[in-house]
Image (tube, rainbow, N blue to C red):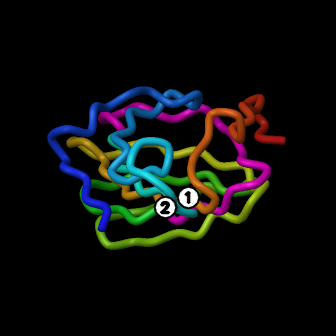
Amino acid sequence: MVKSEYTKAKPYVTRDGTLIRELLHPGVHGPGRVSLAEAVVAPGAESVRHRHPVAEELYHVTRGEGTLFLDGEWFSVQTGDTVRIPPGAAHAVKNTGKGPLHILCVCVPPYSHGDTVLLPEDGL
């Protein structure tokens, strides 16, 4: 069994500028093929547009509201929404609400800074 304690998972900022707390990651918690993290985006803040050439991501909004950029389009997301981000898809998230936007992020294979490519504003 692998168990992670929320309070012991220290937050850090990813290459795209998002505050992340790794809840379960093979690099920290032992062997595995998936990672689970919580992203917190402050009101008015936006991540840098980026893509992951290898990883597929699932975003599940647990609190707040915002907009998500995915391959050239912006659309609204709110508590309870889940979005699949295919490998290589340009994406970013912006908090449009008054409180923090919390997103659970599942990555397969696990998140890696080396698999994060920052993009220009046009997202290409």
| Occupied quadrant, residue 8 | top left
Q: Are marks 2 and 1 in contact (CB under 8 Å)?
A: yes
Amino acid marked by disc 1 = Cys
Tell me the quarter of the image containing the N terminus. bottom left
Judged from the image, the secondary structure of the residue bearing numbered disc 2 is: strand
Q: Which residue is mark 2?
A: 106
Could you tell me residue 93's position as x and y percent?
Answer: 51, 46
Please state which of residues 93 and 34 is positioned toward the viewer in this rendering: 34
**Magenta residue span:** 41-58
- Please state if 71 lies on the left or on the right of 30 as rendered: right
Packing grade of label 2 (10 A; few <14, some 14-19, many >=20) is many
Q: Residue furthest right?
A: 124
Magenta stretch containing residue 57, yes or no? Answer: yes
How many numbered marks are there? 2
Where disc 1 sits, the SS reads strand
Question: Where is mark 1, residue-wise?
Answer: 107
- What secondary structure predominates along the stretch shown in magenta? loop
Residue type of the residue flagged with mark 2: Val
Residue under the point 25% across and 53% down: 4
User: Where is residue 72 drawn, in percent x and y?
Assistant: 75, 53
